[in-house]
Amino acid sequence: SVPLLQAARKKNSLNLLELSEAELEEQFVRGDGPGGQATNKTNNCVVLKHIPSGIVVKCHQTRSVEKNRKIARGILQEKVDLFYKGEDSDVFKEKKASEKQKQEKKRRAKENLERKKLFKEMQQLDKE
């Protein structure tokens, strides 16, 4: 189920499982990464654990604790939804659809590149 959990964090997901605050364990820790003193002195990184499933989310996207709490809950909700619903989850379906679009875009770009190469070759032949 680990690859499924990596599909989380997609926008506009509908029909997600609801999380109750009783099922959550929340901690505030010091964030890591760039930021120097602003990062090293403040505990604005949120670590959120869903106790029944054991899924843990760490969020340190902003300097605001409240924004990080909100973002972490959104990410956790999507991951829990994936954990319980698997391939039936809207998050998983969105991920598959976006991957398909990406592959289609790559295929079209490759075709266009081939057409351009052929066109240049034809121009070279016409000049000779």
Image (cartoon, grey):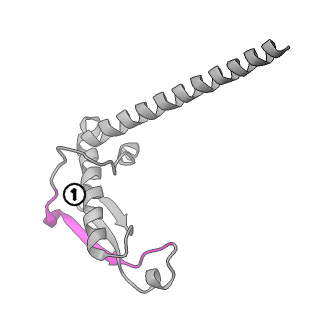
Asked where in the image residue 19 lies, by quadrant, the reply is bottom left
Asked where in the image residue 70 lies, by quadrant, the reply is bottom left
The vertical placement of 112 against 62, above or below, is above
**Residue placed most toward the observer, 4 or 118:** 118
Q: Is residue 63 magenta?
A: no
Check disc 1: other Cα within 10 Å, few if <14, some if 14-19, many if 20+: few
**Residue placed most toward the observer, 121 or 3:** 121
Could you say where residue 34 lies in the image, as x and y percent from the top left? Answer: 52, 74
* Residue located at (41% from left, 31% from top): 100
Residue that protrudes farthest toward the right in the picture: 128
* Residue located at (39% from left, 67% from top): 61
Q: Which residues are magenta?
A: 19-33
Q: Is residue 23 magenta?
A: yes
Could you say where residue 72 lies in the image, as x and y percent from the top left? Answer: 29, 63
* Residue located at (37% from left, 35% from top): 96
Disc 1 target residue: 52
Quarter of the image where the N terminus is located = top left
Could you say where residue 53 lies in the image, as x and y percent from the top left? Answer: 25, 55
> Is 121 on the left or on the right of 38, as rendered?
right
Could you say where residue 62 lies in the image, as x and y percent from the top left? Answer: 37, 71
The vertical placement of 3 against 51, above or below, is above
* Residue located at (25% from left, 39% from top): 89
- Please name the amino acid that badge 1 sits on: Pro
Quarter of the image where the C terminus is located = top right
